[in-house]
Image: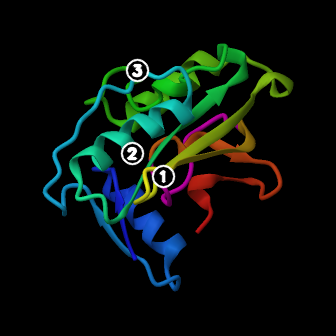
Amino acid sequence: MKIIFATGNKNKLDEIRAIMDGYGFDIVTSKDEGIAADPEENGESFEANALIKAKAVYDLSDGKAVVMADDSGLCIDALGGEPGIYSARFMGHDTGYDIKNAELLRRMEDVPEERRSARFVCAVAAVLPSGREVTVCEAMEGRIAYSISGENGFGYDPIFYLPEFDRTSAEIS
C-alpha cells in the first residue's frame, strides 16, 4: 500500500520511513507524486493543522493512496505554551533552529528548574482512500535544557531535555 506523506521536511521523512520500516508500505512525499499543495496552516490545534495538510494533498491525489500529514511542535509552559502550533514559524520560516533554540534559551535563562516543564507534541492525520479522516495526537513530556546539546534529531531536539534518559532528545540515537 502506498502512503503519500505531505511533507517537504527530509528529516521528518527519514524518521517516518524508519518508523514504518518492515510494515510493507511504499512511503512517498506529495512532491514525489507531483502534488504541489501548500495550504495555510490556520488551525487552532496540531490536529487541525495536520488534517488541513492531509486533506489538501488528498484532494489533489488520485484517491488511491492513504495520505498522511503531521503537525508538531514544542510547548513550553513557562512561555504560555509557546512556540506551540507556531513552532515551525517561530521567528520566521527561514530562521534556523540554531537561532530559534538560542532565543528560547535566552527567554528561559532565569526560569528555575521546577518551571522548565515542556512537551513535544505531534499530531498525525490520515485521509484514507474512502475519504475517512483519522487523527491522533500524543506528547512527550520533558523540560527545557540550560544549553544546546546533541547532534541527533533536528529542530528543537537539542534543547528538549528528557529526565528519564538524562539527555536531550538530540543526544539520543
Residue at the spot 18% in from the left edge and 61% down from the top edge: 33
Q: Which residues are magenta?
A: 144-154
Q: Which mark is residue 156?
A: none
Q: Disc 3, disc 2: CB below 8 Å?
A: no
Q: Of callouts 1 and 2, which one flags the residue occurring earlier in the amino acid sequence?
A: 2
Measuring from the top left, give residue 5's x and y in whole percent. 36, 57
Q: Disc 1, disc 2: CB below 8 Å?
A: yes
Q: Of callouts 3 and 1, which one flags the residue occurring earlier in the amino acid sequence?
A: 3
Mark pair 1, 2: CA separation? 6 Å
Q: Which mark is residue 126?
A: 1
Q: Which mark is residue 42?
A: 3
Going by the numbered disc 3, the residue's amino acid type is Asn
Measuring from the top left, give residue 50's x and y in whole percent. 46, 39
In the rendered image, which residue does mark 2 sit on? 54
Mark pair 3, 1: CA separation? 18 Å
| Mark 2 Cα shell of 10 Å, populated few (<14), some (14-19), many (≥20) | many
Dot 1 falls on a residue whose secondary structure is strand
For discs 3 and 2, the disc positioned in front in the rendered view: 2
Dot 3 falls on a residue whose secondary structure is loop
Residue 146 among those drawn in magenta: yes
| Mark 3 Cα shell of 10 Å, populated few (<14), some (14-19), many (≥20) | few
Task: Check the picture and name the quadrant holding the N terminus.
Answer: bottom left
